[in-house]
Amino acid sequence: MDVGHAESVGRAVEALKRARAVAAITGAGISAESGVPTFRGPDGLWRNFRAEDLATPEAFARAPGLVWEWYRWRRGRIAGAQPNAGHLVLARFEDRWPDFALLTQNVDGLHRRAGSRNVVELHGSLWRARCTAEPARVFDEMQQAPGTGDPGRVPACPACGAPLRPDVVWFGEALDPAAVARAHDAVTSCDVLLVVGTSAIVYPVAALPALARRSGATIIEVNVDRTPLTADADIVLRGAAGVVLPEVERLL
Ligand code: OAD
């Protein structure tokens, strides 16, 4: 560990030790070490696929089978992946601080599989489907919705027969207001906000660190690279989440 990095880890540990309430925002980078592709990295999904063809309401209206195929492919990749050390540290942080909020942009479900119970999935979940006619009808873990796993099939709502869609947020869609409200509460009431493995450019989540800062929180960024947030973060821990988060935890 170089001296600058060790000092930053030390400052992060001190801030966390003083904190009464802690929040974390995670992005695709935290799952990279589990073998799940990010969106904008060298092998990122948006470098190999066009979001307009796969992750918009228009794409689903045009070619629902293709969209389902893509989500099934992603589920297949994730089903074989395991939560990594970074996910596990954040799951243990839930026990360390009674007031700990985990806000994720990830739809992979790895935080829950790592043991986190209180996760706000701001962009939805790959493991749920919902009815296009009655959005309140959500089918968890795909189990109650026959056909969601069948290749080439657009599954139908078991209650009304309308097509089901993945329960994720697509480009051009609003986030669930209840999830956004929970995220706002968490970032405006925390003493420390960890921002882990996100390019911090997709709104509205990208606005949360600035909101936390205005409310007095210390912002700690954990990322292998610079992001637009880096200059405004109080502490920058440069490195892989699966390495850096355990380093921090060991000193807590
Ligand atoms: P991105 O792919 O945009 O960014 C991933 C970030 O993780 C980058 O800043 C990387 O430098 C960093 N990173 C990569 N490996 C890492 C590691 N091992 N440890 C720490 N950091 C690492 O993914 P997101 O920021 O999550 O939205 O993207 C945000 C949203 O854009 C996604 O939720 C998705 C996408 O379009 C929707 O689909 C609505």
Image (tube, rainbow, N blue to C red):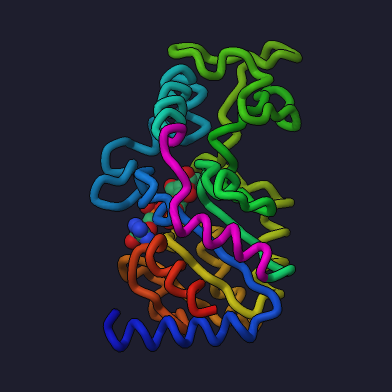
Q: Is residue 183 left or right of residue 225?
A: right
Q: Nearer the viewer, residue 100 or 106?
A: 100
Ligand 1 placement by image quarter: bottom left
Q: Nearer the viewer, residue 7 or 196?
A: 7
Figure check: 107 above or below 237: above
Q: Position of residue 231 (x, y in %)?
A: 39, 80
Q: Is residue 187 left or right of residue 172?
A: right
Main SS of residues in magenta: helix
- Seen at 56% across and 54% down, the residue is 104
Q: Position of residue 121 (x, y in %)?
A: 61, 48
- Seen at 61% across and 50% down, the residue is 115
Q: Position of residue 43 (x, y in %)?
A: 25, 45
Q: Is residue 40 left or right of residue 246?
A: left
- Seen at 67% across and 24% down, the residue is 131
- Seen at 65% across and 70% down, the residue is 187
Residue 58 lies in the magenta-colored region: no
Residue numbers of the magenta segment: 78-96
Residue 88 lies in the magenta-colored region: yes
